[in-house]
Image (cartoon, rainbow, N blue to C red):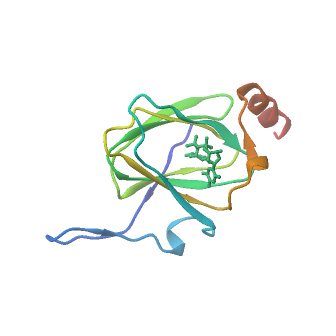
Amino acid sequence: MEIQLVEIPKIVNAQGNIGVIEKDVIPFDIKRVYYLYDVPSSAKRGGHAHKNLQQLLVPLSGSFDVTLKDGKEETTITLNKPDKGLLINNNIWRELNNFSSGAVCMVIASGVYDEDDYIRNYREFLSYVKSNK
Ligand code: T46
């Protein structure tokens, strides 16, 4: 399964860097930004898919693992570079775990929060992707 990493443009300076996400960096209009922080190392986040939402996950600080499943294949990636974001399309199941101490996961989303867009049951997800082929 293809992993879609997005290179975030940066301004590098000996006094510290700046990562800049302008509208052309991501393939959707930004409707919401939220972030996960103070996540215990034993926590499991995600465990769902979205029918329509697309998102870019950026590890602003620390690291965490993201497992993606499309109903056929699965792949796991460690995010630990603040200039590399992970694009997650709709109809992809995601699980996040193994958060390091102080990890911050910023999420840039194509839509506002809508619980009806979530599929939180894996069996339901499998039949949803089958029926949408
Ligand atoms: C995703 C991963 C990476 C809101 O009310 N507004 C929001 O914008 C969000 C993101 C969540 N919530 C509520 C919904 C739940 O009652 O906060 C509660 C916890 O949300 P959830 O269990 O979905 O959190 P995560 O960390 O498992 O998932 C979140 C996003 O929901 C999801 O879209 O891809 O982060």
In the displayed structure, does residue 41 sit left or right of residue 26? left
Q: Residue at x 77, y 36 (%)?
A: 129
Decide: is 21 above or below 55.
below
Residue 104: x, y in percent? Answer: 39, 50
In the rendered image, the quadrant that contains the N terminus is top right
For the image shown, how many numbered marks are present on the structure?
0
Viewer-side residue, 13 vs 48 = 48
The residue located at (68%, 54%) in the rendering is: 53
Residue shown at 35% from the left, 42% from the top: 63
Q: Position of residue 17 (x, y in %)?
A: 25, 68
User: Whole-percent x and y of residue 96?
Assistant: 50, 36
Residue furthest to the top = 123
Quadrant in which the C terminus is drawn: top right
Between 107 and 6, the one lying in front of the other is 107
Q: Is residue 4 left or right of residue 79?
A: right
Give how far across and how far down residue 23 sits, in percent: 54, 74
User: What residue lies at 71% left-to-right and 35% top-to-bottom?
Assistant: 120
Compared with 110, 105 (above or below) is above
Name the residue furthest right.
Answer: 131
Left or right relative to 10: residue 52 = right
Quarter holding residue 39: top left
